[in-house]
Image: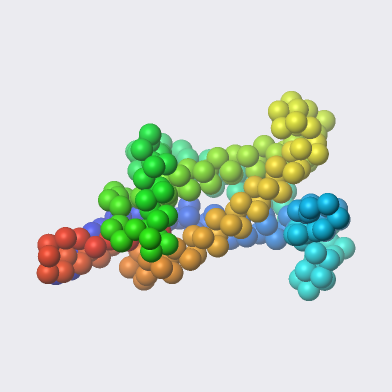
Amino acid sequence: MKRIIDNKHPLAIRWFHWVNFPLLGIMIWSGLLIYWAYHPYKIQVGDWVLVKFFPDWLFIALKLRRRLAEGMAWHFVFMWLFMLNGLFYVGYTWLSGEWRYLIPDRHSFREAWDVVLHDLGIRKIAPLQTKYNAAQKIAYSGVILMGLGSLLTGLAIYKPIQFAWVTWLFGGYTSARVIHFALTMGYLLFFVVHILQVIRAGWNNFRSMVAGFDVIDYGNTGQSERTDA
């Protein structure tokens, strides 16, 4: 037997989610236009370069070269929209009480490991969850902190004199730029994992973020089968 559960994700949460998706995409794209002008970051052992962020061929293939001014213009305009959407999201979750579903508790890190084991197929029984499981709570709360970190480090490298105290807080201009870049890589990693989890969870979970309702299948055992991503 199936039953529809209305308002799994409130309309405001869905709006913030879908507005943030293109905003973050534009921020990353425009950031690459800026990064082209000076892209020194890489992982290497001695003289052996393991990973270079990003190689020249990628800038050429994506036509990102010689567009520094364009990238800065896009980046600094959409920075404000990204910030406002984040502020409205945090404000709404606080006033509506949605934060209670998102904030990890003292058991979350241990329970998140069980979620990882289940997703990898090592643990057969899915951990119990409410609206979000422990891994989701950590990930979603972490992304909010990452957004704050991106804003502050962005200001530190955009206006290092006017926001000298912010630049100092992150260890100077060079350090702030490294952190800003690392946070961007974190968004890309989060995006990949998030999409894979959405695909794994299936259509019912995706629909709940679009339409707001969930369908619970009680089957023959009387137990609900729910997935979230």
The quadrant of the rendering that contains the C terminus is bottom left
**Residue 32: where, in percent of width, then height?**
75, 58
Residue 136 image point, x, y percent: 42, 50
Number of callouts: 0
Residue under the image location 68 percent in, 48 percent down? 182
- Name the side, left or right, on which 193 lies relative to 11: right
- Answer above or below: position of 147 versus 31: above
Q: Residue visible at 78% across and 69% down? A: 58
Residue 100 sits in quarter: top left
The x, y position of residue 106, in whole percent, is 38, 34
Residue furthest toward the top?
A: 165
Q: Is residue 37 left or right of residue 107?
A: right
Observer able to see residue 173: yes
* Residue 11 visible in the snapshot: no
User: Quadrant location of the N terminus?
Assistant: bottom left
The relative height of residue 207 versus residue 142 in the rendered view (above or below) is below
Residue 179's place in the image compared with 224, above or below, is above
User: 226 and 9: which one is in front?
Assistant: 226
Question: What residue is at 60 percent from the left and 53 percent from the top?
Answer: 187
Residue occupying image coordinates x 74% and y 44%: 178
Q: Where is residue 51 drawn, in percent x and y?
A: 75, 59
Colour scheme: rainbow
Q: Residue furthest front?
A: 46
Along the viewing direction, whichever of 125 and 222 lies nearer the viewer? 125
